[in-house]
Amino acid sequence: MKKEISPELYNYNKFPGPSFARVGDKVVAEQIQLDLVENYKEAFDQTAFGQRFSQLMLKFDYIVGDWGNEQLRLKGFYKDDRKVASEQKIGRLDDYLTEFCNFGCAYFILENPNPQELPVELEDKPARRRRNRSRNRNRQQDSAGKQSQNQKQQGTKGTKKQDSKKQEQKRQENKKQGQKATFTIRNEEKSSQIRKKKTDRKPDQPRKKASQEPKETKRGFVIRQK
């Protein structure tokens, strides 16, 4: 069987909420006592306040409630001598009402004479998160290893390309040198052949002269006969 709870005791933050009662300028609940400092346009409603109230509001020195669109909103402030942000001090209440509240809205201020520092509950970290961290580390290490391998491969590729370029340059130089050597050899062969021809012609010249002499004598002999 579900427990039936009246809407007056329904709390939006913690179910069910405390039931507040107003006694003069004091608002009282179970182990809670607050002072009503200001009640502009009779804004304080104990049932609506109980519905919106949360235990987290007890850490503030002041609790401010303002109405907008028929809904109550609560905001906590500290005293001016507290070492907190200036926006959270009660001295900035006018700025809060003008900037964040409806113009001319109804509001009230409750003072908390005994603010309570609520203990912070530490959540136990599950083992899965640790595993995830270890996995993330392993992934980072793997990615770093892959990057180093890629860099090494790129370096080896660059060196191979440089070596191939050097080898091609050497081959081209060797080809040029071979062409020069063959050219010089051919030139030497041609010069040697020319020299041989010259040496062969020299002994033939006196024979030709000897052969020419009898012709001349024959010619002279014929002339004499005439």
Image (spheres, rainbow, N blue to C red):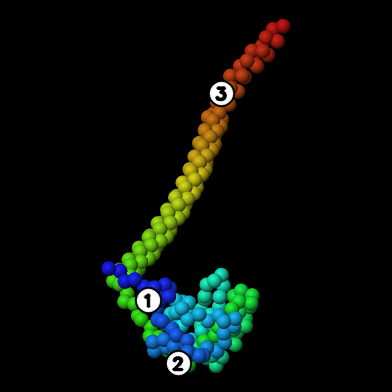
Q: Please name which of the two marks, 1 or 2, marks the residue nearer to the observer.
A: 1
Q: Pointer 3: residues within 10 angstroms few (<14), some, or many (20+)? A: few
For marks 1 and 2, give the CA distance. 23 Å
Q: Which mark is residue 225?
A: none
Instruction: Please name whichever residue, 5 or 84, is drawn nearer the observer in this view of the structure.
Output: 5
Q: Which mark is residue 16?
A: 1
**Quick one: label 2 or label 3, which is nearer the N terminus?**
2
Residue at x-position 56% and y-position 75%: 67
Image-based side of 140 in relation to 96, left or right:
left
Question: The residue tagged with tag 3: helix, strand or loop?
Answer: helix
Residue on which the image places disc 2: 114
> Hey, what amino acid is under mark 1?
Pro
Q: Please name which of the two marks, 2 or 3, marks the residue nearer to the observer.
A: 2
For the residues bearing labels 1 and 3, Cβ distance under 8 angstroms? no
Q: Horizontal and vertical percent for residue 217?
A: 64, 15
Instruction: Please name whichever residue, 38 or 129, is drawn nearer the observer in this view of the structure.
Output: 38
Question: The residue tagged with tag 1: helix, strand or loop?
Answer: loop
Q: Which mark is residue 207?
A: 3
Residue at x-position 68% and y-position 14%: 220
